[in-house]
Image: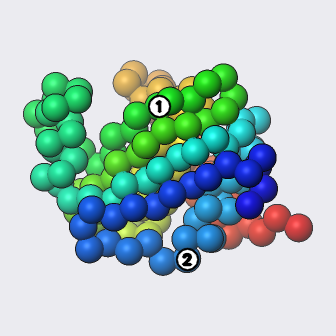
Amino acid sequence: MNNQDGIINFYSENDFILKDEDVYKNWINRVISSEGKRLGEISYIFCDDDYLLDINQRFLDHDTYTDIISFDDSMGNLLNGDIYISTERVHENALEFNEDFETELKRVIIHGILHYCGYKDKSEEDAALMREKESEKIKLFHVEQS
């Protein structure tokens, strides 16, 4: 793995299994590099709605379902953290936005990375830039590095 031997982990707290993990790892690495950052250690934890709701309530004091919660432990340009993704919510959102599951999953996977890179999504302007960046990075998924 390039990018200074950082580590990307994928864990599952439900029955979801990410296929082609290495393809995803390479893509995430390319996205991190494209933002001028370095990979430290990032763990993705795939789970269901209730698991993520519990984290939202306990750690963020939010009583709502969400598709992603990221805990950012980055230091400067070295990206570290834990990204929790509700595959249930991703599936629901894909249906709602008339998108296929894989594309919506990529959007959410990279959303956490973009937060670590400093992008926000609270204001309308920031959210619009975040969406633009997500779409730009999704296009990198099938671009192979030579």
Give the quadrant of the C terminus.
bottom right
Q: In this view, does 99 lie above or below 52?
A: below
Q: Which residue is drawn at 74% across and 66% down?
A: 143
Could you tell whether 102 is left or right of 42 in the image?
left
Which amino acid does the dot numbered 2 rest on? Asp
Q: Can residue 132 be seen in this view?
A: no
Q: Residue at x 66, y 33 (%)?
A: 78
Q: Residue 20, which numbered label?
A: 2
Could you tell whether 15 is left or right of 36 in the image?
left
Which amino acid does the dot numbered 1 rest on? Asp
Q: Is residue 145 above or below residue 5?
A: below
How far from the left and from the top, in percent, is residue 65?
17, 44
Could you tell whether 121 is left or right of 58 in the image?
right
Q: Residue at x 41, y 45 (%)?
A: 83
Q: Residue at x 67, y 49 (%)?
A: 6
* Residue holding disc 1: 72
Question: What colour scheme does the image use?
Answer: rainbow
